Image: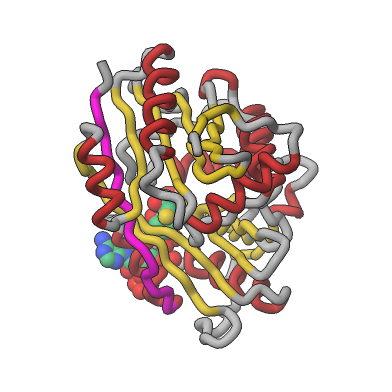
Amino acid sequence: MTVIVRDLRPDVRADAEGFSDTRRLALPYMLSTPESVVHTLTHAHPDAHFGQLVAEEDGEIIGTAQISVAHESPEPGQGSANIYVRPGHTGRGAGTLLLRTAEERLGRLGVTKLFTWVLDEPDNRAFAERHGFRASRSAWFLRLDLAGGTLPPRQDPPAGVELRTAADFADDPRPVFELDAEASSDEPSDIDVDLTDYEAWIEETWKQPLLDRDLTTIAVVDGRLAAFSAAYTDGGSRYATAMTGTARAFRGRGLAKLAKNDSLHRARAAGYTEAFTGNDTGNEPMIAINKWFGYETCAKEIRYVRELG
Ligand SMILES: CC(C)(COP(=O)(O)OP(=O)(O)OC[C@H]1O[C@@H](n2cnc3c(N)ncnc32)[C@H](O)[C@@H]1OP(=O)(O)O)[C@@H](O)C(=O)NCCC(=O)NCCS
């Protein structure tokens, strides 16, 4: 039984299904569908050199890697490789082969600093450390039971604040892009993000099949887009917050809570039973917001980094 690593073929349905199944089993807190896998690969910005690798054993996909150059960062030479092996199929060399392939490819593209997210379990951490990575920041996956749990009651927006959906901006999503760009640039991360390319954002983010524009809520204050909570859904029962953000001038007024609460209430009404979200350790306002909703932690992940060369 030999493990091989190759590129995902976006036109082969079994590849997209094997990829998303593996991701869902290894990382159940993030949504992944065959459509989102293909979209992410085929709509990525060319400068990202985005790749999706699969590890295959006897024709079955047992591991995945998403690799890219951090082209939106002002600091050159950074890249990432996120590797997940299907539970029950670890220890067969798939992770090592995926990582080696990722490092070779990204190294050829000028990446000298490689980041990877690792679920906080002893085997995973030992794997990363054996391969020369050192731990940096951490983040949490959180889950909220929408079916059995309780949500904070729905609030009426304060005077001058109107709640809209992303679908309301379908004719001209540029103000949504501008709000996302401002908030994303303030999100704590090892890799700074500077979203400047509107066309790329349309392709990658706005057209992402997981994005549920109807369930995405945007708080508008006197005609200006002030805060948003972006919803992903997978066509089943699972809902995830892709991003919550408030424009700097409007922070500390309860608008992120207002937008996220509206989106969660509408998701529950639409039949979604589980809501996932994430938090970087140290993002105190977002941690406070998620605590207020009653989210419970379900896993921790650690960002590891290694200098290539
Ligand atoms: C995080 C963010 C969305 C918050 O937006 P906001 O509109 O200011 O949030 P709200 O006013 O609805 O709620 C903020 C809560 O955080 C609390 N808070 C603010 N700073 C805090 C701190 N340093 N420590 C603890 N709590 C803090 C506030 O007191 C408030 O809670 P309260 O209503 O119980 O008092 C906004 O800061 C942002 O866009 N940041 C950049 C993007 C980002 O990091 N997004 C999260 C990605 S996971």
- In the figure, residue 270 lies in which quadrant? bottom right
In the rendered view, tell whether residue 68 sits above or below residue 16.
Answer: above
Front-lying residue, 228 or 117: 117
Percent across and percent down for residue 171 are: 79, 42
Q: Residue at x 35, y 39 (%)?
A: 116
In the rendered view, tell whether residue 194 sits above or below residue 220.
Answer: above
Q: Is residue 295 magenta?
A: yes
- Write down the region rendered in magenta: 294-307
The answer to whether residue 67 of the structure is visible from this angle is yes
In the rendered view, tell whether residue 122 sits above or below residue 95.
Answer: below
The answer to whether residue 253 of the structure is visible from this angle is no
Percent across and percent down for residue 121 are: 29, 57
Front-lying residue, 210 or 301: 301
In the image as oriented, which residue stretches furthest toward the right? 171
Left or right? Give the position of 103 relative to 203: left
In the rendered view, tell whether residue 282 sits above or below residue 293.
Answer: above
Q: Residue at x 45, y 51 (%)?
A: 89
Q: What colour scheme does the image use? A: secondary structure
Front-lying residue, 105 or 267: 105
Q: Is residue 97 magenta?
A: no
Front-lying residue, 133 or 30: 133
- In the figure, residue 82 lies in which quadrant? top left
Percent across and percent down for residue 197 are: 58, 26
Q: Residue at x 59, y 60 (%)?
A: 219
Percent across and percent down for residue 210 are: 66, 51
In the image as oriented, which residue stretches furthest toward the front? 1
Left or right? Give the position of 173 relative to 151: right
In which quadrant will I find the C terminus?
Answer: top left
Count of numbered labels shown in the rendering: 0
Q: Residue at x 65, y 64 (%)?
A: 163
Q: Which quarter holds ligand 1?
A: bottom left
Dominant SS of magenta comes to strand
